[in-house]
Amino acid sequence: MTRLFTYTVIVIGLGATATLGISPNAVNPGTTAEARLAADGAFRDGLYLGKLAAEGGQTPRPAIGRWSTQQDRSMFTAGYRRGYAQTVASANAERGQPTE
């Protein structure tokens, strides 16, 4: 009886571990490109830092060394450029200047 209980506990524990190990943050293949970008941490980080650089009047120089893989670096750069461009365009629109 003790062995049966032990095996049952092991099986239940493994099943629970496998269930919890499935990532709830996995991106569904049917999602839009914008949703995938919004789910990417490197892109969001670049978007934020690009916005801050534009608000601070700095030249656009993304610090890609913050990310270790080439995929993350390219996503960071894309986010940085978008955040910088959107912030500059928004500031120019508020001042009544044409966008470039």
Image: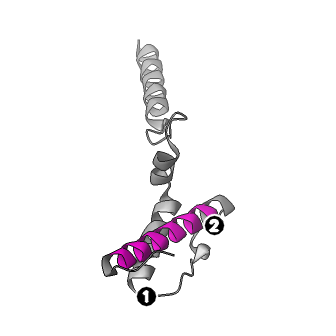
Residue at point 48%, 19% (across, down): 7
2 or 1: tag closer to the N-terminus: 1
Residue drawn at x 61%, y 75% is 65
Q: Position of residue 40 (x, y in %)?
A: 50, 54
The residue where tag 1 is placed is 57
Q: Nearer the viewer, mark 2 or mark 1?
A: 1
The quarter of the rendered structure image containing the N terminus is top left
Q: Is residue 100 above or below residue 72?
A: below
What secondary structure characterizes most of the magenta part? Answer: helix
Per the model, the C-alpha gap separating discs 2 and 1 is: 27 Å
Q: Which residues are magenta?
A: 74-93
Residue occupied by mark 2:
68
Label 2 SS:
loop
Q: Residue 66 sits in which quadrant? A: bottom right
Residue 87 image offset from top left, x and y in percent: 41, 73
How far across and down, in percent of the image, does residue 86 sit? 44, 69
Q: Position of residue 43 (x, y in %)?
A: 51, 61
Which one is in front, 72 or 7? 72
Res 78 → quadrant = bottom right
